[in-house]
Structure formats: C-alpha cells, structure tokens
Amino acid sequence: MTTGLWALALADFRERRRRPGYLVVLLGTLALGLLAAPVGDSRWEVFQVTDLHGRYTSGYVGTVTALGGAVWLSLAGFGIARGAIGRDEQSGVGRLLAATPLTRVAYLAGKFGSNLLLFGSMLLALAGTALAVQLVKGDSGHMDVLRLLLPYVLITLPLLAAVAGCAVLFDTLPGLRGGLGAAVWFAVWLVAVLGAQAGGGPDLLGMRRITASIRESIAAGGRPADGVEFGVGLTADNRVLGTFDWPGLGPGEAGAQVLGAVLLTSVAVGLALLGALWFRRFDGAGPRPAAGASEAVRSGGPAPEAGPAAFALAPGRLAPGRPAPARHGGTVAAALLGELRILVPGRRLWWAGAAALAVLAAGVAPDGPSHPVLPFAMLWPVLVWSRLGHRAGGGSTAELLGACPAPVRRGLAVLLAGVVPALAVVAVPAVLLLTAGQPRAAAGALAGALLVPALALLCGAVTRGPRLFQSLYPMLWYGMINHVGGLDFLGVSGERAPAPAAVAAVAAALALGALALDTARHAAR
C-alpha cells in the first residue's frame, strides 16, 4: 500500500510540475527569497524589526527566507495545489481509478502526498537560495546548516502541510472547488497566517519564539528591547537601519517548536482525509450523453455523435435559413456582449452587488488620497476576472470563434468584457474623487481598472486556467492595501504610488502580451 501511495503521489507531482503555474510560483518563491535577504542595497523587507536589521548569519537568513516562503506559498501555493481531483474527473483518469481497488482514503492520501512534494520542491529551491545568500553576503564566515534549515523544518513545512491538507479538503467539496474556494481561502489566509502575528491565536509562523529570542539578543547587545516591534510582510523601508546580531534558533530553543510542528502536521493529515466521509471516488462517473442520446437509446436507434460538452446541438432543432448578410462593423461589440454574458454568471445578482457598492461609495466622502470604498470594491469582480483568457467553466466564445481569422478583435472583446465590470465598481469613487479636486486619484482608480483585467487576461492565456490569477491578485491587493508603493495599482497611497500613466502603460503591456500569445496560438492551429 505504501508503494502504491508513493507512486500515485509521485505521478501526480510530475504531472503538475510541468504546468506553467508551477514555474510562475517557483520563480516567485525564489524572488521572494532574494527580497527577504537582499544581496544588494535593496530596502525591501519580509521580516521587519522596527528600524533594525539583522546581520546575515545562517540562522537569520534561514529564518527570514523561511518566513517569507511560509507567507507566499500558503497563498500562491494553495492556488496550484488545489484542483487535482477536478482534473482527474475532467480528464477521465477518475473513471480509470474507479475501476481499481484504490480506496478513497488511499486516493486522498496520494493527493496530499503530491501536494507535499509540490511544496517540498519549492522549499528546497528556497533553501538553496538562502544558502547562496549566506555564501555571497554572509556577515559571518561560519556556515551553520542546522540553524539555516531548522526554520524550514519546524515552521514552514508544517504550515504548508496544513495548506496541502486544506487543498485536498476543498477539492472534495463541490462548492469550494472553483473561484469561491479561492475567495474563502484568502479570508482564511488573512486571519490564520497574517492575523497570527497579532497574538491571541495559533502561532502558525512561530513568531513568539522567534521574537523572544531576538529581543534577548538585542538586549544582550546593549539596546532597549521593550519597544521593538516585529512583522512579516513585504514592505520597503528607506530609513537608515541599525543592526543586531542574532544566531538564529538553535536545537535547544527550537525544541519548543517540535510539539507544535507535530500537532500541525497531524491536523494537516486529518484535514486531507476528512473528505473521505463524503467523497465517492468517481464511482459511477462517466461522460454525459449528448442531447437526444437517451431518446435514441429508448427507441432502439443509434445515438447522435456528441460535440463539445458546452455546445452540444440537437440535429432535430437545426433548420435551414438564409445566410446572414455580411457586416463589417459591430464585430467587437457583438463579441463583447457575448463575453459579458459568459463572464458574469447570475447576471442580476452580480450587477445588484455592483449597484450596492456604487450606492455605498456615493454615501461616503473621499478620505485622504483615495476613496475608502475603492480598494474593497475591487474585490467584487475577482471571480469574473479569473475567467478571462481561458475556457471558463465549460463554455467560451473561443469554442465557437476558433476558426475566425481575427483573434486580435476577439481578444480585445475579452479584455473589454473584463474592463466593464471594473469600471462598474470604480466609476462612482472615481467621479467623487474628481469632483473633490483629486484628478490624480481619479486617474489612478481608472488605471487600476485597466490593469487588473489585463493581468487576469495574461494569466489566463499563459496557464489556460484561473488559478494563477486567483493566487497573484490577492498578493497584489494585499500589497496595495498596505501601501507598498510599487504594488499600489489604485493609487491609494497618494504620491507614493506609481503614476497613473505608468500603471496604464503596464496594463497595455500585459494586454499586448496576452493578445500576442493568443495570436501565436491561433496561427499555430
């Protein structure tokens, strides 16, 4: 049984590591490691200690990169970890597994193991980055591999095991398999991972033990340690920083983390296997018959050939008609209306929510450099944007228009279909900012309304799925809401934010990249 579970986990991991989303998250992990412990003069930080900066000992470099990996992979990694069960169901692998003696518990355990291999491969790459930083810019000639790796083993890996278990659990719940699951996990991530820093809750990042040890080192160096504050999150600090010498968590200090790591790993296994109570292992799964197939079977006649699932047509309903006159205008507008109907499911409910946000924004006066409702309004269309650039939910005009010779016009229609919901939620705040004498803030809101759909379109075109955007956009939004200047795509931090023209230029570059990729794929057909 153990050999079979390992084979299942390894095969699933090998399939997933070939996906573009894996490469993107892996590159982001390595980049975050370099930001957490920069070699040059960068002021970006992942681990903040008021106005101090730790010397690059093995323990310090290992800790800050491990904490950065925990924060990043617990959100972006979740996006690529979930969805494995849905892919087995859509690809037909599930029907093959249903014919084997593989139990539900064994299948879910294999998916959990695959998620662990996924995260483990990224942690190995991140640990290699930390080791390279220590060799290049280490403030100490002594390399302590144990202190460098202990934070990964006792903090990051148990947390990611819990993320892996939650990804399997979400996959067994039909309501959380799609975009709603991404939104729910973002809320869980904000409360459980980032909220843990405030104390009063499970210390998932091990911050209590780390901060207590650093305070002792600061006090031993002759500095007052009572007013020292700590935080984890990507920020840029231009202040002149002092330094402190901290060797990191040693085997004795880390011993207190072992019990928590074992407990969190046990909870992770339980979460992964909990779905076995209702998961039915694809028993009885099979392709749905095409329209008219059941009637043909009952009458003894042959079943009609099935077309694509989203556009199966009943031949009896087709009738001859006159060809439509050729029209050279309105192609993009017609495609735009079609894409909007596909992108915004449950149209009345979604537009009602957008209208409620507009009414709320109209009742609140602009405060400071931006409108207080604007950042939160930009969360409402997330599930709409995540459907851009790929076959969304089994239906897309790309299935019908794939033979058309104008992929650029089709791509523009898709992009505009993503911009319309963005404008629906930012229009009222932008108008209020303009009337309040803040044209730069109004222009920033409109530029952000162009950037996010362009980003979603490119992510969907690259990965042919929604998960990359669902992982990247919460990080971008979190950086914006925390006034990280380089990530403030809405201009909520005022003059510190990028110029609206620069944001619009980035949006244009992202859109052009997505359209170029779509055109290249169309030409290669």
Image (spheres, rainbow, N blue to C red):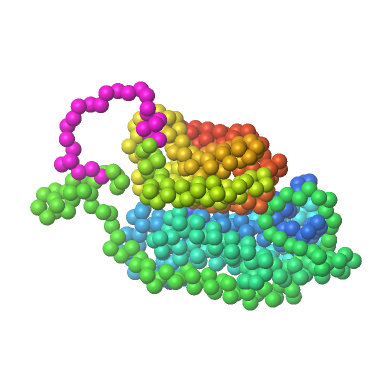
Where in the figure is residue 302, as x and y percent of width and height?
14, 48
Q: Residue at x 46, y 36 (%)?
A: 416
Where in the figure is residue 148, as x and y percent of width and height?
72, 63
Q: 402 or 358, which lies in front?
A: 358
- Quadrant in which the N terminus appears: bottom left
Numbered circles on residues, count: 0
**Quadrant hosting residue 62:** bottom right
Query: Magenta region: which residues?
Result: 312-336
Q: Residue at x 81, y 61 (%)?
A: 142
**Quadrant hosting residue 205:** bottom right
- Quadrant in which the C terminus appears: top left
Give the vertical position of 519 relative to 252 (above or below): above
Which residue is most to the right?
222
Where in the figure is residue 254, as x and y percent of width and height?
71, 72
Q: On the picture, is 218 further left or further right than 33?
A: right
Q: Is residue 460 magenta?
A: no
- Residue 393 visible in the current orientation: no
Give the vertical position of 121 relative to 192 (above or below): above
Q: 356 or 509, which lies in front?
A: 356
Q: Residue at x 36, y 38 (%)?
A: 338
Where in the figure is residue 444, as x and y percent of width and height?
61, 39
- Residue 282 visible in the current orientation: yes
Prevalent SS, magenta region: loop
Q: 69 or 329, which lies in front?
A: 329
Q: On the picture, is 20 further left or further right than 46?
A: left
Q: Residue at x 59, y 64 (%)?
A: 191
Which residue is most to the left?
299
Give the vertical position of 122 relative to 513 (above or below): below
